């Protein structure tokens, strides 16, 4: 089944404790992206990647890192999480037009 | 900075009614526009994708239109059903970045 998977689905952590949210797609898509969704603000793009080893900042990249070492994987790294990074995070991939989304990761930073 | 606006923010209709959701965008160099559905606490499900060269797309009871010159897209839902209750999001693709509206929350009353 064609899909985008994210792990973990739920995460509660404390300020400053490094974490990684994994994202994987099995559709051989070149484009992958991370978003955060906050009430009243909608979905905002954090980082995107046009292909392996190519990443670019979206609208809200501060406090996040990404890497794209393989086509299928695009992990999101929070080196020192803060409470304002509490949000619902989505990973997405695209083969050129349509975007497909993962199920989301609900992150709470205490 | 691209802005995507969705009006209304919330809509409540009786079952069986036809309805229109609106999406406005500021970038005339749009690559494509995608409509999504999001159920509470869930991920995004793609409904329709309209390429910049197209005027409309149809899938079942859904019809989406695109007018690049006016910066508008509409999602028409025919014969609404309670199962259509969800938040509907539009996303503008500028080629390498995606910009989302904040959505229209639809409630269809049985």
Image (cartoon, coloured by chain):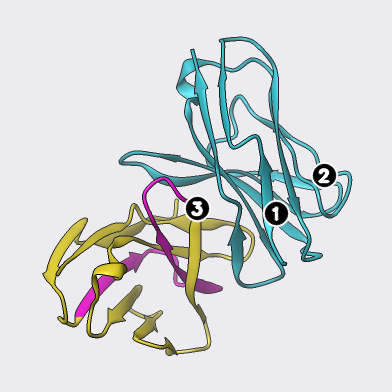
Chain colours: A cyan, B yellow
Which numbered disc covers residue A14? none
Q: Which residues are magenta?
A: B19-42
* Residue bearing the label numbered 2: A68
Q: Residue furthest left?
A: B14
Q: Would you say the residues marked 3 and 1 are in contact, meaning their CB atoms lie under 8 Å apart?
A: no
Residue B30 screen position, x and y as percent: 51, 71
Marked residue chain, label 1: A
Q: Are marks 1 and 2 in contact (CB under 8 Å)?
A: yes
Q: Earlier in the sequence, mark 1 or mark 2?
A: 1
Q: Nearer the viewer, mark 3 or mark 1?
A: 3
Q: Is B40 contained in the magenta span?
A: yes
Label 2 chain ID: A
C-alpha gap between disc 3 and disc 1: 16 Å
Q: Classify mark 1: residues with Cα within 10 Å, few (<14), some (14-19) or many (20+).
A: many
**Residue found at x 60% / y 34%:** A61
Instruction: Between label 3 and label 2, give the one nearer the viewer.
Output: 3
Residue B72: where, in percent of width, then height? 33, 74
Q: CA distance from mark 3 to mark 2?
A: 23 Å
Q: Residue at x 56, y 10 (%)?
A: A15
Whether residue A21 sits left or right of residue A58 in the image: it is right
Q: Is residue A103 magenta?
A: no
Distance between the Cα atoms at labels 1 and 2? 9 Å
**Which disc is residue A32 wearing?**
1
Q: Which residue in the protein does label 3 denote?
A: B43
Which image quarter is the C terminus of chain B in? bottom left
Whether callout 1 and callout 2 share a subunit is answered yes
Determine crowd level at label 3: few under 14, some 14-19, many 20+ residues with C-alpha closer than 10 A.
many
């Amino acid at each position: 089944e064609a899909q985008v998977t994210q792990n973990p689905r739920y995460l509660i952590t404390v300020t400053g404790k490094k974490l990684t949210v994994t994202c994987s797609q099995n559709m051989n898509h070149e484009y992958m992206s991370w978003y955060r969704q906050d009430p009243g603000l909608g979905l905002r793009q954090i980082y995107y990647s046009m292909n392996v080893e190519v990443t670019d900042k979206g609208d809200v990249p501060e406090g996040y890192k990404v890497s794209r070492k393989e086509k299928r994987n695009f992990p999101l790294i929070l080196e020192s999480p803060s409470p304002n990074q509490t949000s619902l995070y989505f990973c997405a991939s695209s083969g050129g037009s349509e975007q497909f989304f993962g199920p989301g990761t609900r992150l709470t930073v205490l | 900075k691209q802005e995507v606006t969705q009006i209304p923010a919330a809509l409540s209709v009786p079952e069986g009614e036809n309805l229109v959701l609106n999406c406005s965008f500021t970038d005339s160099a749009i690559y494509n526009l995608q409509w999504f559905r999001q159920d509470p606490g869930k991920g995004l499900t793609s409904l329709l994708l309209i390429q910049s060269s197209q005027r409309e797309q149809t899938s079942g009871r859904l019809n989406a239109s695109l007018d690049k010159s006016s910066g508008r897209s509409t999602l028409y839902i025919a014969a609404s059903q309670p199962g259509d209750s969800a938040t509907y999001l539009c996303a503008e693709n500028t080629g390498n970045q995606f910009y989302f509206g904040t959505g229209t929350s639809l409630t269809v009353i049985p």
